[in-house]
Image (spheres, rainbow, N blue to C red):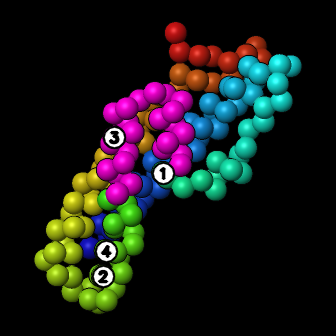
């Protein structure tokens, strides 16, 4: 179970990292577009310190993607269950987990695969937004 637990937690962290990068990109785009109009600065530290729920909410707000928001809510629920209750339960049982714990871990692992898929989707979307340092302008999706 230990290897599966680590794989699942990696997938959840991957989604969080992709959301952080996406928000930095979106915020940098806003900062660039607002230059000379209003003082808007990217709060990189705020993004870095934000939890998965807050990152996902902000990302969903920027992208207006209801399916993402629904999927990520299930992922967050599974991540919290795995990280908090199940890990402690497994530790109390000293590695000999009960059938109930095993089933809950398997359910959380399925959601971790969703987290990995969502992270890949965020990464793919971000490929459409980048700053061209030669032209000093943003490339945006058509």
- From the image, tell me which residue sits under label 3: 70
Other-residue count near label 4 (Cα within 10 Å), few / some / many at <14 / 14–19 / ≥20? many
- From the image, tell me which residue sits under label 4: 86
Q: Are marks 3 and 1 in contact (CB under 8 Å)?
A: no
Q: Earlier in the sequence, mark 2 or mark 1?
A: 1
- Residue 6: in sight, yes or no? no
Choose mark 3 or mark 2, whichever is in front. Answer: 3
Choose mark 4 or mark 3, whichever is in front. Answer: 3
Is residue 68 magenta-colored?
A: yes
Q: Position of residue 128 (x, y in %)?
A: 53, 22
Q: Secondary structure at mark 1?
A: helix
Is residue 69 magenta-colored?
A: yes
> Is 3 situated above or below 25?
below
Q: Which residues are magenta?
A: 54-77
Q: Earlier in the sequence, mark 4 or mark 3?
A: 3
> Image point 31% across, 89% down: which residue?
92
> Image point 33% across, 33% down: which residue?
67
In space, the residues marked 3 and 2 are separated at their CA atoms by 28 Å
Q: Position of residue 101 (x, y in %)?
A: 21, 75
* Quarter location, residue 2: bottom left
Q: Secondary structure at mark 2?
A: helix
Q: Are marks 4 and 2 in contact (CB under 8 Å)?
A: yes
* Left or right of 6, for residue 38: right
- From the image, tell me which residue sits under label 2: 89
Q: Earlier in the sequence, mark 1 or mark 4?
A: 1
Considering every residue shown, the one lying at the far top of the view is: 142
């Amino acid at each position: 179970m230990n290897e599966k637990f680590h794989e699942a937690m990696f997938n959840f962290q991957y989604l969080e990292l992709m959301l952080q990068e996406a928000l930095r990109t979106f915020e940098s785009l806003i900062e660039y577009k607002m230059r000379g109009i209003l003082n808007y600065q990217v709060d990189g530290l705020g993004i870095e310190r934000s939890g998965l729920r807050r990152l996902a909410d902000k990302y969903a707000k920027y992208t207006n993607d209801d399916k993402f928001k629904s999927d990520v809510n299930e992922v967050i629920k599974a991540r919290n269950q795995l990280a908090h209750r199940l890990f402690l339960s497994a530790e109390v049982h000293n590695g000999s987990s009960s059938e109930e714990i095993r089933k809950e871990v398997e359910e959380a692992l399925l959601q971790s695969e969703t987290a990995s898929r969502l992270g890949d989707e965020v990464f793919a979307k971000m490929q459409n937004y980048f700053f061209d340092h030669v032209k000093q302008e943003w490339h945006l999706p058509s």
